[in-house]
Image (spheres, rainbow, N blue to C red):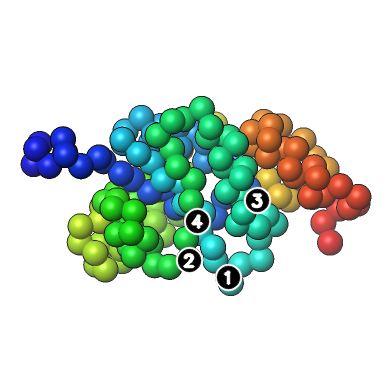
């Protein structure tokens, strides 16, 4: 098994919508990047959602805020996660957990993914307690009313949110 690890890099995928990326996401990205040879931050292109940022905008923001992490790759996908994992030759899914509610949902997903591909494992990382309340939805709600999100998102994301909501007087 150790020989196999020497010859094959340990690749993990951190999937999500990242609409937008928050400091909570960044906490998981930074910590996970230290655990694997390569971490793919994969933006889910979910056609059933109506995101604030396009997939390309989310990828660009993630690329900007992870530029200091040399083993992080930003990508997107529109497929079953286990199919994408095979495509990327990855065997570990990284998921952040904020609460017991998150864990119940994530456990379902992990079990389903393992059923679809038993070579894929899911690793749960507890979020830093200072971000346990934080979600992209909360950030968008605050930003839509021109509230201060500087403690919640990287500066590049704060600027992008200001541009998205420029000229709007509140959430419509």
Q: Are marks 1 and 3 in contact (CB under 8 Å)?
A: no
Q: Mark 2 or 3 closer to N-term?
A: 3
Q: Mark 1 or 3 closer to N-term?
A: 1
Return the residue found at the far top.
68
Residue plotted at (25% across, 40% down): 9
Q: Are marks 3 and 4 in contact (CB under 8 Å)?
A: no
Q: Residues within 10 Å of mark 1 (few under 14, many from 20)?
A: few
Q: Are marks 4 and 2 in contact (CB under 8 Å)?
A: yes
Q: Mark 3 or 4 closer to N-term?
A: 3
Q: Are marks 2 and 3 in contact (CB under 8 Å)?
A: no
Residue plotted at (71% across, 50% down): 140
Residue plotted at (57% across, 42% down): 62
Q: CA distance from mark 4 to mark 2?
A: 7 Å
Q: Nearer the viewer, mark 1 or mark 4?
A: 4
Q: CA distance from mark 3 to mark 4?
A: 11 Å
Q: Quadrant of residue 54?
A: bottom right
Q: CA distance from mark 1 to mark 4?
A: 13 Å
Residue occupied by mark 2: 78
Q: Are marks 1 and 4 in contact (CB under 8 Å)?
A: no
| 165 displayed left or right of 80 | right
Task: Name the element at disc 1.
Answer: loop
Q: Residues within 10 Å of mark 3 (few under 14, many from 20)?
A: some
Q: Mark 1 or 2 closer to N-term?
A: 1
Rendering coords of residue 148 (x, y %): 77, 35
Residue occupied by mark 4: 76
Rendering coords of residue 143 (x, y %): 76, 45
Residue occupied by mark 3: 57
Task: Name the element at disc 2.
Answer: loop
Residue occupied by mark 1: 47
Task: Name the element at disc 3.
Answer: helix
Q: Residues within 10 Å of mark 4 (few under 14, many from 20)?
A: some
């Amino acid at each position: 098994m150790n020989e196999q690890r020497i010859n094959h890099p340990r690749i993990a995928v951190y999937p999500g919508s990242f609409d937008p990326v928050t400091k909570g996401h960044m906490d998981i990205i930074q910590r996970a990047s230290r655990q694997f040879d390569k971490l793919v931050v994969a933006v889910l292109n979910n056609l059933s959602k109506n995101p604030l940022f396009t997939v390309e905008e989310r990828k660009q923001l993630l690329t900007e805020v992870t530029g200091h992490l040399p083993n992080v790759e930003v990508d997107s996908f529109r497929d079953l996660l286990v199919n994408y994992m095979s495509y990327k030759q990855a065997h570990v899914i990284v998921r952040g957990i904020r609460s017991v509610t998150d864990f119940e949902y994530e456990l379902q997903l992990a079990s389903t993914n393992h059923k679809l591909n038993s070579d894929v494992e899911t690793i749960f990382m507890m979020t830093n307690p200072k971000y346990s309340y934080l979600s992209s939805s909360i950030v968008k709600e605050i930003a839509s009313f021109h509230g201060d999100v500087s403690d919640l998102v990287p500066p590049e994301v704060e600027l992008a949110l200001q541009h998205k909501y420029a000229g709007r007087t509140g959430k419509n």
